[in-house]
Amino acid sequence: MIIDSHCHAWSRWPYQPPVPDPDTRGRIEQLLFEMDQNGVDRAVLVCARIDHNPDNNEYVADYVRAQPDRLHQFADVDCSWWPTYHTPGAAQRLAETADALPIAGFTHYLDGSDDGSWLHSDEGLAFFRVAVERNLIASISCQPHHHPALRRVAQAFPSLPILVHHLGMVKVADPPPHTGLREVLASASLPNMYLKFSGFYYMTETKWNFPFSDTMWVVRALYEHYGPYRMCWGSDYPVVRPNMTYRQAIEALRTHCTFIPDADKAWILGKTLARLLEGRVPS
């Protein structure tokens, strides 16, 4: 079984520069086609209410309700682009989202310029307490410098799975002593911290250079610390398209991470996420 832990879908393409097919490029039908072509059984849609898509949570929810055997939703709740970002009432907004939508988790994108202290403030802890009460997965987009704050959340709520995007956003150009990498590796000491095995191109300046051989030393270090039971492969489709194809997003792991045994790849490609989703998929 292969489960995509990180993909998106929008009714209208949100990014610049303009594309000739803005009304179809990001639609869920495109994702389902890629999944079918590449043997991907299920996918988690990470919602993002960005440009032209303020209704992205509702758009994705309609498809999840129609195909609950294939699609799962992590709703956008108070992400950095939303006007309620880190304003009072976050816990209530998460509860209302969980009541209204068929979600297995939520996503929260942190602004790279903040220090992450909101995460363990009274408001932040109340927010994550709702996630525990509602049996949700927390899908967090953050930078390495946010990890000390994120570890405080993980320690406060040990039953809450925290799934960090794109291999922790470590940069291969980060000079010794590799402070960013060290922060992400330190989070591996907490058993409820997970990494998405996705977004190789975020780590390097040569974003076109598949299979991203220059990143493999970082990927190996992360794998050796987190192991296969706390890593989940993701495509980042359709954002991935300028950098590699959907198939290449799979093969970056399956073919080119030769240091990972096949049995461990099976866990990263789907078994780990299947175990996380079990019991959290709405009926």
Image: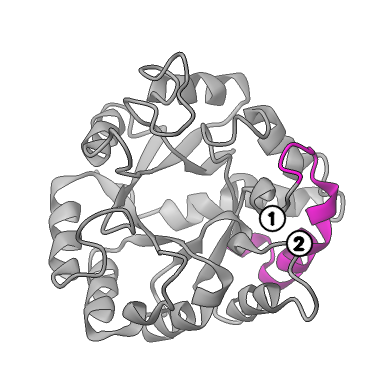
Q: Residue at x 28, y 48 (%)?
A: 103
Task: Tell me the kind of residue under disc 2.
Answer: Val
Indicate the position of residue 109 as horizontal and vertical percent values. 39, 59
In front: 169, or 93?
Answer: 169
* Principal secondary structure, stretch drawn in magenta: helix
- Dot 1 or dot 2: first in sequence order is 2
Task: Tell me the kind of residue under disc 1.
Answer: Met
Q: Which residue is mark 2?
A: 172
Indicate the position of residue 268 as horizontal and vertical percent values. 64, 51
Q: Residue furthest front?
A: 17
Indicate the position of residue 139 as horizontal and vertical percent values. 42, 59
In front: 178, or 273?
Answer: 178
Is residue 260 visible to us here? Answer: no
Is residue 166 visible to us here? Answer: yes
Alpha-carbon span between mark 1 and mark 2: 6 Å
Q: Which residues are magenta?
A: 206-230
Mark 2, other Cα within 10 Å: few <14 / some 14–19 / many ≥20 = some
